[in-house]
Image (cartoon, rainbow, N blue to C red):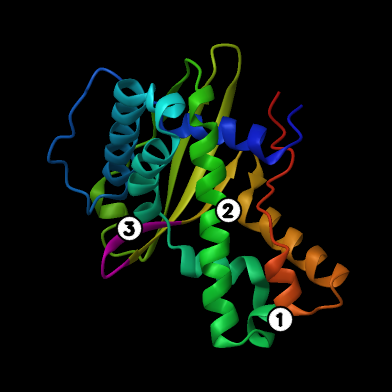
Amino acid sequence: MLCTHKNFLFLFLFIFNNLLANEFIDNQDLRDPYNFIDSNAQKMVFVLTKNSELFETDRERYEQKIKDIFEPMIDFRRVAASVMGKKYYLLATKEQRAQFVEIFKDSLLDTYAETLAQWGDSTISTQFQDDFLYKELKTVEVKQTLDTGTSKYPISYKLRKDKEGWKIINIIINGVNLGLTFRNQFQALAISNNEKIESTIDNWVSDAGDAGIS
């Protein structure tokens, strides 16, 4: 069993490891949430296969390449608000909400980029749907299957469409709801800090815990 946030995110990384044969991104319609996920997966794979040496020689540059791809994929404002939960979101000032968005984003992206060098050989398949099933919707679920060679695990993205296109607002891996896990962590941290929002934000560290994947 994995029991640390780095180990959890190591498994989470595999969701992007598909379509390795293509080195360049084609002009797929990114208004399609399924192509949105797949196209960014290809970009990520290209960085990892062509720039892996940067992890040792220029860590900052390497991590920035990963962040440049991954950061635009997630609606961090909406995710951070969900992690705080209605009670603590309303207790927080506008400045504190904005502060937590940045802290949450940085902690997740830093951990994510740091663990990418540990990639292994895994594959992933996406369940594409007909376009009429999502064109009139604001939220869509995109399902995938992670194949590590010895086991297969279901992955589910929840995406929301805004004026910029599709954005990830939650991920469920092997039944573990990432957004809910972070929300429970924030609530526990808030209680341990006597519900002082400033202290809770200052002490935040992303930790997804045990993903239930062995």
Judge whether 170 appears above or below 56 on screen. Answer: below
Q: Which residues are magenta?
A: 162-168
- Looking at this view, is 169 or 2 the one in front? 2
Residue 164 colored in magenta in the image: yes
Please identify the quarter of the rendering in which residue 127 is found. top left
Write down the residue under mark 3. 166
As drawn, which residue projects farthest toward the top?
Answer: 150
Residue 190, can we see it? yes
Check residue 107 in the rendering and tell me which mark sits there, or answer none: 2
**Amino acid type, callout 2:** Ser
**Amino acid type, callout 1:** Lys
Please identify the quarter of the rendering in which residue 5 is found. top right
Judge whether 94 appears above or below 61 on screen. Answer: below
**Amino acid type, callout 3:** Trp
- Looking at this view, is 129 or 64 the one in front? 64
Apparent side of residue 88 relative to residue 156 in the rendered image (left or right)? right
Q: Nearer the viewer, mark 2 or mark 3?
A: 2
Label 2 and label 1: CA atoms lie apart by 23 Å
Instruction: Identify the residue shown where x is 43% and y is 62%.
Output: 75
Label 1 and label 3: CA atoms lie apart by 27 Å
Check residue 134 in the rendering and tell me which mark sits there, or answer none: none
Where is residue 72 shown, x and y percent of the image?
35, 55
Write down the residue under mark 1. 87
Instruction: Identify the residue shown where x is 41% and y is 26%.
Output: 57
Quadrant assignment for the C terminus: top right
Mainly helix, strand or loop, the magenta region?
A: strand
As drawn, which residue projects farthest toward the front?
Answer: 57
